[in-house]
Image (tube, rainbow, N blue to C red):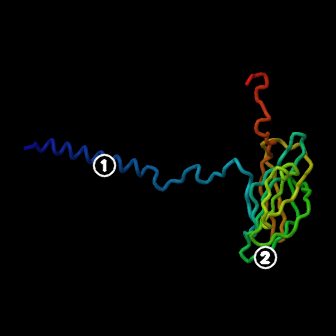
């Protein structure tokens, strides 16, 4: 027969272990993590018109090796009323972006803007739901990694967002970080 003391000790130890596990498991219950509301720094900015009819994604100011600037973006007509929308103008830091010919965007279509070089290297879809437009703007001493205000004006409203100024992307295999090193 076991003594009452050893049973009480074991019961107490089990109770403490269970209470500890419960307290530790509940330690973060209901808490909001810091990363739950952060946006990935990899892609460009995203925003939409107040009524949600048009959205822009991957908004980035691009600089090439010569310092020429362009605006990269993807605009989508997501108007549930199925109306077409037109991009009327775009400004970066108060400066007008030069846009190629832009047709109205029917419902569920996309407008992709990029530099001439970017469009040349971009695989184009054979579908009629994507429109491509060349963009350009004067480089007013934009700094890599900086942010600039961008305003898109559509017939359904304006979209304002901050876009990162991106350094040129080096083609794979064409850049060596240590030119003196042998391979």
Residue plotted at (25% across, 46% down):
14
First-in-chain label (1 vs 2): 1
Q: Quadrant of the C terminus?
A: top right
Residue plotted at (78% across, 59% down):
74
Side of 54 where 21 appears, left or right: left
How many circles with numbers are drawn on the protein?
A: 2
User: Which residue is denoted by mark 1 in the rendering?
Assistant: 18
- Secondary structure of the residue carrying numbered label 1: helix
Q: How crowded is mark 1: few (under 14 residues within 10 Å), some or many (20 or more)?
A: few
Q: Which x, y percent locates residue 40?
A: 66, 50
Task: Answer with the quarter of the image where residue 85 lies.
Answer: bottom right
In whole angstroms, how far apart are the C-alphas of marks 1 and 2?
Answer: 60 Å
Task: Answer with the quarter of the image where residue 157 lies.
Answer: bottom right
Q: In the image, is residue 44 above or below residue 83?
A: above
Q: In the image, is residue 48 above or below residue 29?
A: below
- Secondary structure of the residue carrying numbered label 2: loop
Residue plotted at (61% across, 54% down):
37
User: Which residue is denoted by mark 2 in the rendering?
Assistant: 83
- Seen from this angle, which residue lies furthest front? 126
Q: Which of 47 and 7 is in front in this view?
A: 47
**In this view, the mark in front (1 or 2):** 2
Q: Which x, y percent locates residue 31?
A: 50, 53
């Amino acid at each position: 027969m076991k003594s009452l003391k050893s049973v009480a000790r074991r019961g107490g130890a089990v109770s403490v272990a269970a209470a500890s596990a419960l307290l530790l498991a509940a330690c973060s219950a209901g808490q909001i993590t810091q990363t739950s509301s952060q946006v990935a720094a990899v892609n460009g900015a995203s925003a939409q018109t107040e009524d949600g009819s048009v959205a822009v994604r991957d908004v980035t100011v691009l600089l090439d090796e010569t310092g020429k600037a362009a605006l990269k973006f993807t605009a989508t007509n997501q108007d549930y009323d199925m109306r077409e929308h037109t991009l009327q103008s775009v400004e970066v830091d108060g400066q007008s972006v030069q846009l190629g010919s832009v047709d109205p965007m029917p419902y569920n279509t996309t407008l992709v803007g990029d530099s001439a070089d970017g469009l040349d290297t971009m695989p184009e879809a054979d579908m009629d739901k994507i429109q491509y437009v060349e963009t350009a703007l004067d480089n007013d001493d934009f700094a890599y990694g900086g942010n600039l205000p961008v305003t898109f004006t559509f017939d359904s409203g304006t979209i304002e967002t901050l876009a990162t100024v991106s350094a040129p992307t080096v083609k794979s295999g064409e850049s060596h970080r240590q030119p003196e090193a042998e391979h």
